[in-house]
Image: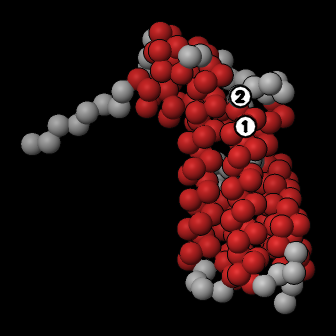
Amino acid sequence: MTTRTMPGPRERLLAAAKELTYEQGVSVGVDALLKRANVARRSLYEHFGGKDGLITEVLRVSADEDEAAYRQAMLAAGDDPRGRLLAIFDWLDGVIAGPDFRGCRYLAAELALAPDHPAHAVTLRYRERVHDLLATELRALGHPRPDPAAAQLLLLIDGALAVGATRSSTHPAAAARQLAEHVIGG
């Protein structure tokens, strides 16, 4: 007989915050977070120092997961750098079409949080990592301007996610893919 251990308060807070901040935004109330996690207020301060620390950690964990998802989508596309770059947009098309899609959690957080919030450093670093991932593929492709082209592709990704939050039926990732083909070149 195996025994199942219930996740601890830290894990429950992270899971609850990941869900609720994506569903309702980072302005979700502390009471709602505590209720969803089924923890006492003390646990929030003990593990994260408060709501700002929890939000920052949720974004850090999500960024790691999302970067891994980008890498997985690219890996599944094979050995061709061009195909790997375009695969990101194909993957995003499926993500945006999902029933639970609510847009880009990083853009939403950046817009909602005060300029001095510690989470901004996490979202900045996440975008830098995605930019570097794109630039690496562009270099492998022999693109003449990999860093500016990576910035353009990142803009297309951000735009597809933003439009997808309000008009997913327009397939913004497919439109962004067509523009990405021009950025990447032949």
**x and y, in percent, of residue 151 in the image:** 85, 62
State which quadrant residue 51 falls in.
Answer: top right
Query: Does 107 appear above or below 172?
Result: above
Q: Considering the image in quadrants, where does the C terminus appear?
A: bottom right
**x and y, in percent, of residue 54 in the image:** 58, 26
Number of other residues with Cα within 10 Å of mark 1, as a class: few under 14, some 14 to 19, many 20 or more: few
Amino acid, disc 2: Pro
Q: Callout 1: helix, strand or loop?
A: helix
Q: Which residue is mark 2?
A: 118
Amino acid, disc 1: Ala
State which quadrant residue 98 falls in.
Answer: bottom right
Outermost residue, bottom side: 186
**x and y, in percent, of residue 177 in the image:** 81, 73
Number of other residues with Cα within 10 Å of mark 2, as a class: few under 14, some 14 to 19, many 20 or more: some
**x and y, in percent, of residue 110 in the image:** 80, 36
Instruction: Say whether residue 97 is visible.
Output: no
Q: Callout 2: helix, strand or loop?
A: loop
Report the residue at 59% width, 45% height from top: 62
Report the residue at 68% width, 39% height from top: 122
Query: Does 18 appear above or below 54?
Result: below
Report the residue at 58% width, 84% height from top: 78
Q: Considering the image in quadrants, where does the N terminus appear?
A: top left
Q: Which residue is mark 1?
A: 121
- Residues tagged 2 and 1 counted as in contact (Cβ below 8 A): yes
Query: Does 167 appear above or below 184?
Result: above
Report, in whole angstroms, how far the alpha carbon at label 2 lies from the one at label 1: 6 Å
Report the residue at 52% width, 13% height from top: 45
State which quadrant residue 60 falls in.
Answer: top right
